[in-house]
Image: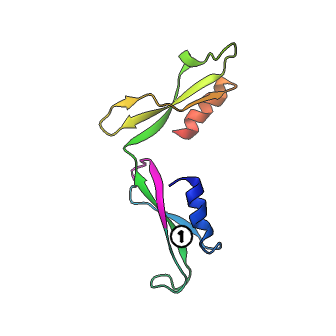
Amino acid sequence: MNVKELIQELKKLPQDLPIRTDNEYPDGENEWIVGLEHSELGESGYELEGEVRLLTDLNKYKLKAIRVPDFDYKNDQRPYAVCLEKHYKNGESEQGEDWRYFETEKKAEEFCLKFN
């Protein structure tokens, strides 16, 4: 499910319901929204209020932000590079295709700290 599809589905629901994810995987693994459910006020178990549940699914890897100083140069400018690496459950990792560039090394390091 992508953002556009999620928004289209959410527009069909009452707009004043609280939202929670249906989190079955507490190990900190990446979860992706794959659908949604909702319960209306008055349904069994929802006598006090209804709710929207975002349904998630595990991906087979975790993303980790890594500083890559060797790739800081971009043309004549020197932005500071961060790559999102894929870390698989079997211990293997591979460099991702998602690169971020920052104006300063400090901003790049702060991004890594917050992301990880």
Query: Percent x, y for residue 64?
Result: 47, 35
Residue positioned 51% across, 86% down in the render = 47
| Farthest left residue in view | 90
| Farthest top residue in view | 76
Residue positioned 64% across, 17% down in the render = 74
Rendered view: 97 above or below 4: above
Rendered view: 44 above or below 30: below
* Residue 47 counted in the magenta span: no
Query: Percent x, y for residue 37?
Result: 48, 69
Residue positioned 56% across, 18% down in the render = 71
Judged from the image, the secondary structure of the residue bearing numbered disc 1 is strand
Query: Percent x, y for residue 116?
Result: 51, 39
Q: Which residues are magenta?
A: 26-36
Classed neighbour count for the residue bearing mark 1: other residues with Cα under 10 Å, few (<14), some (14–19), many (≥20): many
Relative side of 39 to 102, left or right: left
Query: Which one is in front, 105 or 55?
Result: 55
For the image, the number of numbered tags is 1
- Please name the residue that numbered disc 1 is placed on: 52
Query: Which one is in front, 3 or 57?
Result: 3
Residue positioned 59% across, 70% down in the render = 18
Query: Percent x, y for residue 9?
Result: 56, 65
Q: Amino acid at mark 1?
A: Val
Rendered view: 22 above or below 41: above
Quarter-of-image position of residue 88 = top left
